[in-house]
Amino acid sequence: MPDPQSPLAQASIDLFNGALLISTLIVLGVGGLLAYMMVRYRARSGAGEPTPDFGNHKLEIAWTIAPAILLTVIAVFTFPALRAQEVDTSKAAGGGTPDLIVIGHQWWWEIRYPQANVVTANELHLPTGRQLLVQLEGADVIHSLWIPQLAPKLDNVPGHTNWMWLRADRAGTYQGACAEYCGTQHAWMLIRAVAQAPADFDAWLRQQGAPAAAVPAGAAAQHGAQIFAQRTCISCHAIAGTAARAVVGPNLTHFASRQILAAGVLENNAANVTRWLRNPQSVKPGNLMPNVRLSDDELRDLTAYMESLR
Amino acid sequence: MSAIPLVPEPTAALPRLRSNEGLLSWVATVDHKQIGILYLITTIFFLLVGGLEAELMRIQLAQPRNTFLSPEAYNQLFTMHGTTMIFLVVMPILIGFGNYLVPLMIGARDVAFPRLNALSYWLLLFSGLLLYYSFIAGGAPDAGWFAYTPLSEKPYSTTPGLDYYAVGLLASGIGSVAAAINLIVTILTLRAPGMSLRRVPLFVWMVLFNSLLIVLALPSLNASLVMLLIDRQLNAHFFDALHGGQPLLWQHFFWSFGHPEVYIMVLPAFGMISEILPVFSRKPIYGYGFVAGSTIGIVVLSLLVYGHHMFASGLGFTLDLAFGLASMLIAVPTGVKIFNWLATVWGGAIRFTTAMCFALSFLFLFTMGGVTGVMFAIVPIDKELEDSYFVVAHMHYVLFGGTFFAVIAAFYYWFPKMSGRMLSERIGKINFWLMFIGFNLTFFIQHFLGWAGMPRRIYTYDNNPGWDWMNLVSTIGAVILAVGVLVFIVNVFVSLRRGAPAGDNPWNAWTLEWATTSPPPLYNFDQVPPVRSRRPLWDLAHPEQPDYQPPAGQGGHNQ
Amino acid sequence: MIQAEQQLGARAGATPASDEAGREQLDRFAAMDPHKMGMVLFILSESVFFTLLILAYLLYRAAPAVANGPNAKTVLDIGLTAIFSACLFASSGTIWLADRSLARGRDGLFRFWLAATIGLGGIFIFGQGQEYYRLLTHNVTVSQNVFGTTFFTLTGFHGLHVIVGLIALLILLGLALAGQFKGGQHRAAVETIALYWHFVDAVWVVVFSVIYIGAWLS
Ligand code: HEA
Ligand code: HEA
Ligand code: CUA
Ligand SMILES: [Cu+2]
């Protein structure tokens, strides 16, 4: 997380650096004292018992107060950073209408832009320099959205809405993960945040809002679309502009425009999509998409269809 | 009452297994020393099991995208590793030492309720067996040691693992409360004449307050587990969001136990350190009253800070702030202890026995773990680092570098009393260096992994910059650490056979347990020496300068 | 069992007789009865346990799922339970009378009040039993909604504690009929159980207020 990209993350890092400095000094102090004593007060043969010393009230008071003062100082610095993280939904821009809804599923992220009616998965886009209000939900168990460079983490709790600020000041791609243990594939529940200049972001949002072509270009892709409708795919996935409307798995409308596949197990390219469709369970053991057992031909055409979903 | 002895009256302090009725006398014993030793043997066994689980995890993590373990296996392993270490190793090993030492240290013949004591131990063993039986019964628990709902509820955890978890921990929880009540009553009512509460050895003092904390905190766990079990078995809805329950309620209930628990796992270790450092520095403990009094502060505070495990769950500004401040505050009474221990060593004549090496490194490693704890108490930092390897580093520094180093020190220190033989110092030094180096190699680097964004509880990871070699270093450290632990086990076995005879008081120590033979006779003491200060044996050995007659200018501190 | 435990404790715990006096002079704690102290600590831990169950009930009292489904106001018979509760509360008085009779050496009276306590506790359990029966047959169960969940858990665990108390009291009565407590002997055992019984009663004061009176007021 060495490179924070938002004021909130920056505030945490500044606090961390300060605390790290103090901690290092304390550890070195205690360690140094120990080292010194180990040399200086090593028992020497022949010497008698050292004189007993039962304590000293002034010293006790000193080393009670000194850490207390230090901690008070730290607390004072903590206060504004903590305050800034707080989301008061009544006062937040738009009166609590989120810019973004992030829903944790076992083991992928559903990402909604309610104002633009866009639904995507595992890849979150945001315009640079704007503070976004994010609403967090958990679909099944507790997850936790953690994009270290952009914001403090916060949990996605079923039946309990959380709100957080998200902001990136520089364009770029930032790694994130699910931080709360959520079962078998918690390890592969990564998320990728793509910060873009506002104009680029708007273009992206517009493109994501468009439905997929009802009939994709190319014979293979067309055949793929048929397979998609005939095999069970359609009972779990949605592709806007087609009959597929299920919400069990990630929305695939613009699947091929995403960088990662299945929440980060693989990079998203044609070869990997084929690998995934051949047997999701061997790529990401335990995930909730079954092996549909497709023939090589079906695989080829279905991949072509998936790749057409730009 | 019938006169037929169902339980053979033990005739020796430590009956040999192969002797007449030897096994039966161990199984049926109600003697606090034998029960204490049973506790220690059992917990060391579970340490090996829990350690083996950790080693398997480390092998899996040694390189990115490793396929040594399946995700299901890994998740069961880390859950069982944490659960084992906390509930079957650290907590009971401290209770075991308390069992063995407290009556000896206060000049009593046994604990107040010897049979209840035996029951506590058997409940522990039963709980361990139940937890491990789950592996055969269809799958071990796999929701982490704090089993967050709804992941731990039936719909998301269909194996019976979590039922075993709940029932197993209930058994150990009930046993722990019983043991704690027993120890409190023992300490309060069975002290030898002269042993006022201001004169008890600090280990006894820590056990007293630790037990009080157990009595106050464990019922929270028991209640949470009961609710979880009712949810799972009777389809109730305590934590079920679909039917109006609240998943976060579990977190509040669990951590209102779970945070006090971490102090339950360290207070007796503080006591051990407070006994060992003085003896090997040849000085009385510095600021007895402050070391003792700060414990009360820790106990009170520990009941008020549990929310610091839930900062990321969205407690809101006010609670975040309150829990954060309270958590920071705990550094004050803990710091008082550290400083007094340092002052105890200051100006002393240090004897570098293995016990002392472990005790001194405790001071260093615990401070390391403590300051990272304070970092978490600074809420914005916690929200960055929670559930990352930084937490794993923190908890192993306080639990392993802290508590466990103190426990090993305690083994080297009290083993002679328990067995009549010294542990080998030569093997001991090897043991120490392997563990010290291995420990730091394993866990220091995990701070950086957490900082680099590695979440905890992941069975594998992508090849992000630096993650591969840092994890490899950690794994290598873990192997060295395991060898260190095995050397310790070897030392115990070798020394039981060939160790030098200990004599009554090999370390020239000052508390009552050293006034009797090693191992102590069945009823502990032929005669309890007079207790007129905190160091009765010093008073006996130094009639010219006893503690109860302080030299001029030092009045008051030492009684 | 208490007695055996005591004998064992006496054998194992004691220093030679001469020390006993010195020990008890140490401080207030050292002079206390170990069994009573143990019971007080046990009660302390049980209080925490019940506190959590009560908190869970309170938390869900106003949940939407409870407002629409069965809840305390709609399904509980407050008047009837108040009568049974009165029995339980009265039993706290009778056990106190039993203990006082024992202290005064009135063995017969002691047995009478002990039996009365058991009787009153029994009536309470009977009352709870019939209430459970009525609820369960009207399809109010632990799995019905969070009211059912928290109500049955809280009152169920309380009932369990009453039953355990009744068993302990029955053992005391048996021992008393066998002549164990002649002349105020082993009074500590009676006092220890009495402490527990008062606690069970006190818990019901809270539970009754929270569930029944709370529903009546709302
Ligand atoms: C022995 C057990 C033990 C001990 C003693 C501690 C001690 C402390 N712990 Fe730790 N903790 C754990 C075991 C322990 N912890 C475990 C197991 C977890 C993880 C649970 C899980 O999620 O699985 C955890 C997690 C944990 C968290 C949650 C992290 C997260 O998940 O986000 C926090 C947050 O505040 C925390 C704080 C503290 C603090 C403030 C202390 C303080 O008590 C430390 C005080 C000590 C010192 C500070 C050092 C000595 C003091 C001085 C030398 C004085 C000067 C110092 C200063 C002024 C700073 N701990
Ligand atoms: C006192 C408590 C304690 C102790 C001593 C340890 C000891 C160790 N721990 Fe543990 N650890 C925890 C308490 C403890 N741990 C807790 C509470 C968790 C959190 C769990 C959770 O998230 O739910 C955790 C989690 C945890 C993780 C994080 C897992 C994850 O989040 O994915 C890791 C990873 O490296 C780890 C490693 C180790 C290692 C290498 C050791 C080593 O020190 C082990 C040393 C080795 C031995 C002691 C055994 C040596 C012997 C053999 C190998 C041979 C065995 C032979 C026979 C059985 C005959 N631990
Ligand atoms: Cu989702 Cu971890
Ligand atoms: Cu804590």
Image (cartoon, coloured by chain):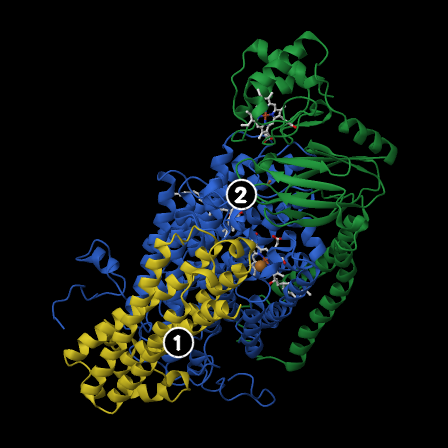
At x 70%, y 14%, the residue is: A215
Q: Amino acid at mark 1?
A: Val
Of residues A122 and B542, which is closer to you in this image? A122
Residue B370: x %, y % from top left: 62, 60
* Quadrant hosting residue B112: bottom left
Asked if disc 2 is less than 8 Å from ligand 2, the answer is: yes
Residue B499 as seen in the image, left or right of residue B383: left
Instruction: Identify the secondary structure beneath mark 1.
Output: helix
- Position in image of residue C30 (x %, y %): 38, 83
Chain A representation colour: green
Q: Indicate which disc residue B378 carries.
A: none
Q: Nearer the viewer, mark 1 or mark 2?
A: 1
The reply to whether residue A228 is visible in this rendering is: yes
The residue identified by callout 2 is B478
Label 2: state its secondary structure.
helix
Could you tell whether A310 is left or right of B247 in the image?
Answer: right
Of all chains, the one bearing label 1 is C
Picture coordinates of residue C173 (x, y %)?
A: 20, 76
**Drawn side of residue B41 relative to residue A6, left or right:** left
> In the image, which disc is placed on residue C40?
1
**Chain C appears what colour?**
yellow
Measure how far apart labels 1 and 2 are at the Cα level: 45 Å
At x 62% / y 36%, what residue is drawn? A189
Q: Is the distance from the Cβ of mark 1 to the nearest ligand 4 atom less than 8 Å?
A: no
Residue B502 seen in the figure: no
* Mark 2 belongs to chain: B
In the rendered image of this protein, does residue C201 appear above or below residue B428? below
Look at chain B in the picture and name its colour: blue
- Using the image, determine if residue C80 lies above or below residue A35: below
Indicate the amino acid at tag 2: Ala
